[in-house]
Image (cartoon, rainbow, N blue to C red):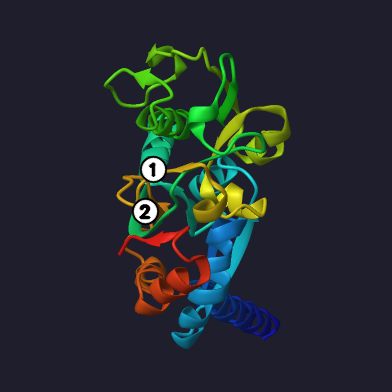
Amino acid sequence: MKFKKLLSVAVASVIALSVVGCGGKSGDDKKIVVGATANPHAVILNEAVKPLLEEKGYELEVTEFSDYVLPNTALDEGSLDANYFQHIPYLEETVKEKGYKLTYTAKVHIEPMGAYSDKIKSLSELTDGAKVAIPNDPTNGARALELLAKEGVIEIADKELVTKLDITSNPKNIEIVEMNAEQLPTTLPDVDCAVINSNYALEAGLNPTKDSIALESSDSPYVNVLACREDNKDSEKIKVLSEAMNSDEVKKFIEEKYNGSIIPAF
């Protein structure tokens, strides 16, 4: 009799744990954790995407990052469901370098990279030996060099992912200074010009359309995307999130909030 009573208690405990486990899993399935840099990515997520997901019964949690490395590490390790901070070439280069099983779903917006200066009003004003700072990661560094070449400051080899070693003509002997992308706005007093990603320019209070002295064209191939893992790409959470990211509401928000400094890509 005592054995039967103990057995009943044990069975009841297992059932209770199962119910709790199922309840937790259900809750987790309605919570979407997305990593993002502060502006515009976290702003778009919190102000435009979150209300749309709430209407569909999902909770959006945005984890902010201040660099370009940790969001992909966190996504690969599984602490994030998705991230939103990078363009396609950067994602592809990271996957190639790190071996992460990451991919993307929605193409969301383009952030034209711009050249900024506290000292000159035009790149044509750069003097002999001027210092120009650019991002030190391969894709954004190449992108910065391409902008300088388009503006006639330098000439570069016709290849993908150019580096400063691929400069074929440098008539003003421009010194290219490479540094972490997030540090570029703070270096403006120390260099003649810096080529800065729009998200970091915005965080520093710079308006790409008004404050830059040169800006990428709107047909830039560097589209910012919603990245996820290969193993959760087809999940319901990522499907709902992707639909929200490419909604008419988000498109209108980007257009009205950023006035052309950020351009919808859908």
x, y percentage for residue 32? Answer: 51, 68
Q: Is residue 56 left or right of residue 22?
A: left
x, y percentage for residue 3? Answer: 66, 79
State whether residue 230 appears in this view: no
Q: Residue at x 35, y 32 (%)?
A: 150
State whether residue 5 appears in this view: yes
x, y percentage for residue 262? Answer: 45, 59
What label sits on residue 101 in the rendered view?
A: 1
Q: Residues within 10 Å of mark 2 (few under 14, many from 20)?
A: few
Q: Residue at x 35, y 78 (%)?
A: 248
Res 91 → quadrant: top left
Label 1 vs 2, first from the N-terminus? 1
Q: Looking at numbered disc 1 in the image, what kind of residue is underneath it?
A: Lys
Q: Residues within 10 Å of mark 1 (few under 14, many from 20)?
A: few
**Which of 78/14 is in front?**
78
Res 98 → quadrant: top left
**Which of 240/133 is in front?**
133
Q: 7 above or below 69?
A: below
Say if mark 1 contacts mark 2, CB within 8 Å.
yes
Q: Is residue 100 left or right of residue 8?
A: left
Q: What residue did someone put label 2 on? A: 231
